């Protein structure tokens, strides 16, 4: 038996019940996002394991009016029930398949937490179906199948997500965009638009939290934000459009690679990020400084309208010469009138709306 204290909860984790301490920052940030959403939420943590995530949502956020926990494992469901009682959290706990519970719970939940081992894709259809006929709601989806989403397992990505990945220097952004695109395409037939309000790529996972709204027109508009990225592995040129752009790179003539379909729209809601930063300052989490650094980086890059990021180390190899420092590259790009920021996806990369030729010219060292 292991005892874990995190946020405002203290739980018991018996042998055979999963609780990953490395996901504490993810749970911190997710709880901040739940609080930043506001309103009154009925939350289901559909694969709760020890129950730590759902219990934190309820304990730390006054806008969570009700909580349901579920797990296929009888042992996990029993642990979650015990932990809920120990933390004085009133909630329903079920030993059930998440998909079955979501189907039976149509119209009951405003916020569906999908945090499986691996891909959330098998649960997306039933999650979207559970919101049919409602004004809207939220889906929070975590994916840990990074080899699939980042391009190391190309066939598995085609099979699971219906998308071709790119094993490029900005593969982690492609990963979240493939996941977001899959959610949008799954929700649309239910007349639901899905827009990411928060996105994170960290360590072994990506996580996206979506706002859903009922309406056929909105669902169509969401699907219109799905397209393809064309990428040159020789010079790092890239472009994101509704359809793939030809066979040859317009900059160097090399054969292009194409990824998608995937999401081309925004990855964050700036107002949600600002509220999360404010809440983080109030809560005193042990990892509060790390969370603030992450959130402020995301707020800055959310203001740059550009697809992908440029890894300066990769550019140095492609340009076969010295490269400017991160600060010098940012300064040059901003001085030329372009938006440019660091990205949380990669510590050696920048996000900028500058054309590829300008980026290649300005990041060269002296």
Image (cartoon, rainbow, N blue to C red):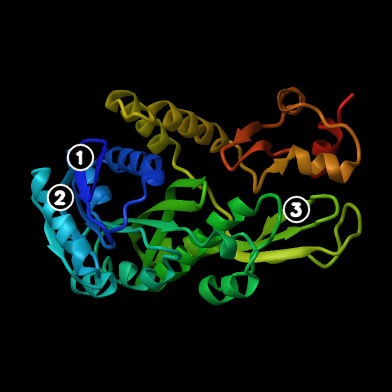
Crowding at dot 1, Cα within 10 Å, few <14 / some 14-19 / many 20+, comes out as many
Q: Are marks 1 and 2 in contact (CB under 8 Å)?
A: yes
Q: Nearer the viewer, residue 22 or 108?
A: 22
Going 76% across and 28% down the picture, which residue do you hit? Answer: 329
The spot of residue 80 in percent (x, y) is: 18, 56
Q: Are marks 1 and 3 in contact (CB under 8 Å)?
A: no
Q: For mark 2, what is the residue?
A: 83
The answer to whether residue 253 is above or below residue 29 is: below
Between the residue at mark 3 and the residue at mark 2, the CA separation in whole angstroms equals 49 Å
In the figure, residue 321 lies in which quadrant? top right
Going 34% across and 29% down the picture, which residue do you hit? Answer: 286
Q: Earlier in the sequence, mark 1 or mark 3?
A: 1
Report whether 269 appears left or right of 342.
left
Asked whether residue 61 is in view, the answer is no
The spot of residue 144 in percent (x, y) is: 48, 58
Q: Quadrant location of the C terminus?
A: top right
Crowding at dot 2, Cα within 10 Å, few <14 / some 14-19 / many 20+, comes out as many
Asked whether residue 215 is in view, the answer is yes
What SS does tag 3 mark? strand
The spot of residue 257 in percent (x, y) is: 76, 64
The answer to whether residue 59 is above or below residue 95 is: above
Between the residue at mark 1 and the residue at mark 2, the CA separation in whole angstroms equals 9 Å
Marks 1, 3: nearer the viewer: 1
């Amino acid at each position: 038996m292991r005892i874990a204290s995190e946020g405002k909860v203290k739980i018991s984790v018996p042998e055979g019940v999963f609780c990953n301490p490395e996901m504490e920052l993810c749970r911190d940030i997710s709880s901040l996002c739940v609080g930043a959403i506001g309103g009154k939420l009925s939350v289901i943590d559909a694969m709760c394991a020890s129950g730590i995530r759902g219990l934190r949502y309820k304990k730390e956020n006054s806008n969570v009016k009700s909580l349901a926990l579920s797990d296929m494992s009888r042992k996990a469901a029993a642990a979650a029930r015990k932990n809920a009682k120990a933390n004085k959290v009133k909630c329903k706990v079920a030993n059930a398949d998440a998909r079955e519970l979501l189907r039976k719970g149509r119209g009951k939940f405003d916020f569906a937490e999908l945090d499986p081992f691996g891909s959330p894709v098998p649960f997306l259809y039933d999650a979207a179906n559970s919101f049919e006929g409602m004004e809207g709601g939220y889906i929070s989806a975590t994916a840990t199948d990074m080899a699939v989403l980042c391009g190391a397992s190309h066939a598995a990505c085609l099979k699971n997500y219906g998308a071709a990945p790119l094993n490029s220097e900005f593969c982690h952004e492609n990963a979240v965009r493939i996941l977001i695109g899959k959610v949008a395409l799954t929700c649309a037939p239910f007349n639901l638009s899905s827009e990411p309000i928060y996105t994170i790529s960290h360590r072994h996972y990506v996580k996206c939290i979506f706002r859903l709204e009922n309406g056929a027109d909105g669902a169509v508009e969401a699907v219109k934000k799905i397209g393809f990225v064309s990428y040159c592995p020789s010079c790092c040129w890239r472009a994101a459009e509704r359809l793939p752009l030809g066979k040859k790179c317009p900059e160097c003539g090399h054969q292009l690679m194409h990824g998608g379909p995937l999401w081309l729209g925004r990855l964050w809601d700036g107002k949600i990020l600002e509220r999360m930063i404010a809440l983080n300052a109030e809560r005193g989490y042990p990892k509060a400084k790390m969370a603030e650094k992450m959130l402020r980086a995301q707020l800055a890059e959310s203001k740059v309208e550009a697809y992908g990021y440029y890894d300066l180390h990769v550019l140095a190899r492609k340009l076969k010469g010295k490269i400017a420092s991160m600060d010098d590259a940012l300064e040059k790009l901003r001085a030329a009138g372009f938006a440019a920021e660091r990205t949380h996806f990669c510590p050696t990369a920048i996000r900028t709306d500058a054309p590829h030729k300008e980026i290649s010219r300005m990041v060269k060292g002296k």
